[in-house]
Amino acid sequence: MPPISSFLSLQAFTFYGLQKSLSEVSMLSLGCCALLLLVMLVCVLKWISRSSSIAKTNKADEEFTASFRGSAHLLALFQTGMVFPGSARAAVYQNACRELSWHLLGTDTVDKNYMARLRTAGRITPSQGEAVNRTARHVTDEVTRPFMVGVGGMSAWSLPVLGLVGALLCLLDGLGREQTGVGLWSSVLLPLLAGALFSLLVAACQRSLAHQARKATTQVHDFAVEIGVALDRMFVDHRQPMELLPSLGGMGITDGPNFSQPPAETVAPMPPPAATPFTAAAPSPAPVPAPSPGIGSGPGSGPAPAAPSAPAAPRPAGA
């Protein structure tokens, strides 16, 4: 029994080497560890704050979803004007219904005659339904953007770097004071170990925060798709394949562009006629028939010369 009793005694759990190493650590090494601890605490506090904010948003979204599932019709919550502070899904729902009311009724104001005007409004065109879906997607991106802020920060990777810098400073300080042995190596290794341990803790916190943010973002995107499909089925008339574009006359434009002539810069201007007096044209001489080629005419021979005319006979005096 003596070995068991000695093992269970407090003397068996005393680490003399560890106590000696920690007792000989320099003040610079302790200061570096305190700095690393401060950075780690700041990162953990930020993680707690962001995680609490996302949890509040999820709780508000659950309250809104429960009210939305139990509502009388699709626009009941919008008609009654119920408010859900901090709910991302409620923001998507309110903006989508406001855009739908604008296309259906010409206004997004809810009054006492809202339901009666909604029954007689009919349906909207597919392009107007696409505008409602586009508004829902835009609001979804806006309300989910704060979820992902700071998720992939550099806090977890900065701690090992700070630990390495602190270890180098402790090494230079120990060599300058001619310190050797256990005290020197304890002062050098302590910032490295602290930086590695704190970085693992901060990385775990960031991983948990990233998982919560992605889950909340996915849920809001899914709800935006759900509300878009529901509004599309109830209020969009897909029997019209395509809206006809108005003509120029229907838009009030009577004088359209004239494309019968090319642009002015591509046509050279015609010079004005010269101011000269009008004169009759002289008659053109009759064409002289060409002589027929002779026997010896060939490719190199020219036309035959004309025969000389005989002189005229003299006229008598008494005639």
Image (spheres, rainbow, N blue to C red):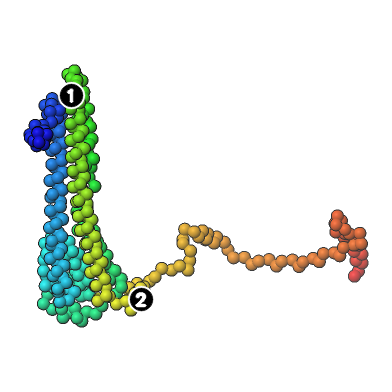
Q: In the orientation shown, which residue stands out farthest toward the top?
A: 178
The answer to which quarter of the image holds residue 169 is top left
Give the left or right position of residue 72, taking residue 157 as reference. Answer: left
Amino acid identity at mark 1:
Val
Q: CA distance from mark 1 to mark 2?
A: 84 Å
Q: Going by the image, does 271 lie left or right of 249?
A: right
Residue 24 vs 301, above or below: the answer is: above
Coordinates of residue 54 in the picture (x, y in percent): 15, 55
Indicate left or right for 218 with 76 as reference: right
Image spot of residue 132 (x, y percent): 25, 68
Residue 56 coordinates in the image, percent (x, y): 12, 58
Residue at (35%, 74%) from the top-left corner? 242
Please tell me which residue is depicted at 14% across the width and 69% down the height of the picture: 66
Residue 143 is at least partly visible in this image: yes
**To which quarter of the image does residue 295 belong?**
bottom right
In the image, is residue 186 above or below residue 55? above
Question: Where the N terminus falls, by quadrant?
Answer: top left
Which image quadrant: the C terminus? bottom right
Q: Residue at x 12, y 28 (%)?
A: 16
**Image location (x, y in percent) of residue 141:** 24, 58
Mark 1 closeness class: few <14, some 14–19, many ≥20 residues within 10 Å: some
Numbered circle sitting on residue 241: 2
The amino acid type, in three-letter code, at marker 2 is Pro
Q: Nearer the viewer, residue 256 or 303?
A: 256
Q: Which of the two labelled residues, at mark 1 and mark 2, occupies the earlier sequence position?
A: 1
For image coordinates 22% across by 65% down, the residue present is 223
Viewer-proximal residue among 102 and 192: 192
Q: According to the image, label 1 marks what residue?
A: 182
Residues at discs 1 and 2 in contact (Cβ within 8 Å): no
The residue lying furthest to the front in this view is: 1
Dot 1 falls on a residue whose secondary structure is helix
Dividing the picture into quarters, in which one does residue 240 lie? bottom left
